[in-house]
Image (tube, rainbow, N blue to C red):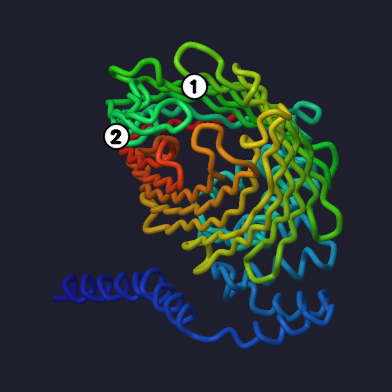
Amino acid sequence: MLVNSRNSQGLLSFLLLFMAWIVLPIYTIVALAEGDMPNLGEARRLLEVGEAEQSIALLNHDLLRFAGNADYNYLLGLALYQAGHAGEALFAFERVIMVNPDNLAARLKAAQINLERGDTTHADELLAPLSEQRPDTEQQREIARMRAKIAAGTAGGGISVRGYVLTGIGWDSNVTSGPSQTELVIPQLSRSMTSLGTATRDDDLVGMVEVGLSLRKSIDEDTWLIGGSSIRQGFNSTRRDMKEGAASLDLGAIRRIGHNFLGVTLLAQDYLLGDATYRNSLGTRLNWIHPLEDHSKLTIYFQHLNFVYHQNIDNAIRKVGGVTYEFTMNDGAKTLQYGVYGGEEDAKDPSKPNFSFRLLGVHLAGNLHVSDDLSLSAGAIYELHHHLAEDGLYSITRHDAQFSVGASADYHLSERRHLIPLYTHTLNVSNVDLYKYSRNTVMLQFKWEFDK
């Protein structure tokens, strides 16, 4: 009995020690997590009025109790950083990230401190997961600023490079952008019906491949050099004479002036139709971007393009200006953009004034972030063309109204791979029968992104 009694006492002692060692700390942690932190509100108030040291002193009273709490550590980190204790502040923000890896604010603060200490590698590692989150406008600016600093601090101010490869296959209802009629009356050619031949509406199976590259180099904290290029080639199953291709190059600079951004870009493009160059263009674009506080921005732009065609009689100068307003809702889950633009295209050949026209358009686009793997996009453009002289074939002044609408889905197969089904519809209404047409395209695209 004595042995059994001693064994029972030993077992009881073990159970009491187990409760003290395991159960009570767990109960305490749960109780603290559910309870209030009485000094947190006062510490935040002191920090807001610039009393960082007093805020730290108040928070330090609860350090042992709340060392694992994300809200406590974030506020302590802010106070330490404001007081000039960057190293201790970094440890506090890192404790937040350990508890909550998705805490965007703590990641930004930790990345900022690493950058100030010259540690671009750790700063870049902290910013990398943010591409999958939805920062607000101010946080987006901060991320862009820090990434520019990282780019400038890497390899002696190297170049940030991003690119993609895009392929697709689908169907086009009107690869010629021609009318449905096979023949029309063209007064200046004949009073009887004239055959349109290969210009008549024609559908075809189509495919495409595109490679794009964008570059960004920071000159200083407020100035960036930017560049972009793409090569696109379309393929048609039967109408190979109508396959389209393009090579584009953009080079420019962006300068932050106060809260605004001013950009200038040189634009160049070769457009191919069939196996020959159909048109070259060279021009410039000026952008003035004004970010607004309510997660939105206003962009005013002017674009000047010089078109040189294979048939020189089509050569023209196009001048267009416009205003675009863009805003986000629900922390970036929804984006809406709309704007208006206008201008004119002037024929260089003085004997062809009917090739010149004025244009006016409106556009609307939106994006909806459905989930981490899926987003939906849609857009529409309505554009009016008013020609400045009578058409040479019809002896009337031509007026066109073109409406285009499109929708797509972006499904993330992985972080860098996307599956994109899309649909577009274009309708051109004209008082000249030769230029009336509609066009529908459906395509399934695969996109692979990369960066350096």
Residue 361 in view in this figure: yes
Residue lying furthest front: 191
Residue 245 has which mark?
A: 1
Q: Position of residue 398 (x, y in %)?
A: 54, 44
**Marks 1 and 2 close (CB-CB < 8 Å):** no
The reply to whether residue 101 is in sight is no
Residue 14 bears which disc, if any? none
Q: Looking at this rendering, what residue extends furthest in the left direction?
A: 1
> Image check: 269 left or right of 306?
left
Amino acid, disc 1? Gly
Q: Which residue is mark 2?
A: 181
* Residue depicted at 62% across the width and 37% down the height: 354
Q: Quadrant of residue 6?
A: bottom left
Amino acid marked by disc 2: Gln
Q: Is residue 436 left or right of residue 215?
A: left
Counting labels gives 2
Q: Position of residue 155 (x, y in %)?
A: 76, 26
